[in-house]
Image: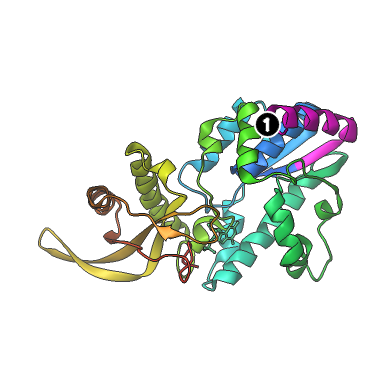
Amino acid sequence: NWTAESFAETTVANLKQQLGDDRVVLGLSGGVDSSVAAMLIHQAIGKNLYCIFVDNGVLRKDEFAGVLESYKTLGLNVKGVDAKEQFYRALAGLTDPEAKRKAIGRTFIEVFDHEAHLIDGVSWLGQGTIYPDVIESVSVKGPSATIKSHHNVGGLPDFMKLKVVEPLNTLFKDEVRAVGRTLGLPEAILGRHPFPGPGLAIRILGDVTAEKVDILQQVDALFIDGLKREGLYDKVWQAGAMLLPVQSVGVMGDERTYERVVALRAVTSVDGMTADWAHLPYEFLADISNEIINRVKGVNRVVYDISSKPPATIEWE
Ligand code: XMP
């Protein structure tokens, strides 16, 4: 019968066999899957695993520095790459959600490919693919189809030609967490809410600018910290804030204001396929709303999203 300990042990032994003295490059996202995959490969081959963690400019507040630090504490050979400006340039002026997703995907590939080329003699690409991803990519479109649509001129980027090592591709999410726990990954990484690859770019409705990212990061951090403080974080599947492309009239002292509106979203779910809006306590919502409006310059109204999926989606874009 399956246990996380025996899975980890066998997998590390197999990886040692398979990889020998080869070098592996792996992109860390801060999420559970890539982190656990990295830990397994690291246990097998140590410094021959080269991890790359990219700041795409649309991560949560302080996430890049914080997560990078915990990766280093875990002993991973990780390079943090600040590519914010490159992502902002690629996103400039884009408002269509799919266009934003593509710009981010394409820029990530450019950055990652560049970084992979800086590593001498790398022959493997490590990935945190889990079993549901395998199923999905077979039945829906396949990762290479997506990648190719971004790169239909010059063919595949070089790192996509590497041999692929995916130690988690037979596991479900809860099994991945269990393996991560036996490997000593901190709860801060294991218990993390899902966060979309395109990050805050798809939570800023309309075009993305550094100023809007800054506002949304502040709002999101107040909301998430509040959920943690009140013991609500682990009771919801996912939570975050959306910056809306409208302004609304407010009043501060005896001045009228005309500022931004943010929507808070928190959902309960088992797999993200369907979701219910989380029935957060009114008092909590009241406190968070006050805190956001008082502390985040440029925001004068907070609304709470009470839509379920379907027919709404978890994200707004
Ligand atoms: P929706 O909005 O479709 O989201 O109900 C379901 C889950 O998927 C995440 N999501 C994404 N994750 N790239 C990702 O890596 C994306 O483009 C993307 N869009 C949505 C969303 O955060 C939720 O967990």
Q: Is residue 18 magenta?
A: yes
Nearer the observer, 4 or 156? 4
Q: Which amino acid lies under the numbered mark 1 shown in the image of this protein?
A: Ala
* Residue farthest to the bottom, as pictured: 96
Horizontally, residue 21 falls left or right of residue 195, namely: right
The answer to whether the beta carbon of the residue marked 1 is less than 8 Å from any atom of ligand 1 is: no
Horizontally, residue 88 falls left or right of residue 316, namely: right
At 69% across and 55% down in the image, what residue appears? 133
- Where does residue 83 sit, x and y in percent of width and height? 61, 50
Nearer the observer, 178 or 211? 178
Quarter where residue 26 is shown:
top right
* Residue farthest to the front, as pictured: 1
Q: Is residue 89 magenta?
A: no
Quarter where residue 140 is shown:
bottom right
Secondary structure beneath dot 1 equals helix
Nearer the observer, 186 or 206? 186
Q: Up-down: is 208 above or below 52?
A: below
Residue that label 1 marks: 4
Task: Look at the image and give the residue range highlighted in magenta.
Answer: 1-25
Categorize mark 1 by other alpha carbons within 10 Å: few (<14), some (14-19), many (20+): some
The quadrant of the rendering that contains the N terminus is top right
Horizontally, residue 310 falls left or right of residue 128, namely: left
Q: Quadrant of ligand 1?
A: bottom right
At 26% across and 47% down in the image, what residue appears? 284
At 52% across and 52% down in the image, what residue appears? 270
At 52% across and 54% down in the image, what residue appears? 58
- Where does residue 267 sit, x and y in percent of width and height? 42, 55
- Where does residue 55 sit, x and y in percent of width and height? 58, 47
- Where does residue 117 sit, x and y in percent of width and height? 81, 46
Please indicate, yes or no, whether residue 110 appears anywhere in the rendered image: no
Horizontally, residue 291 falls left or right of residue 54, namely: left
Please indicate, yes or no, whether residue 194 appears anywhere in the rendered image: yes
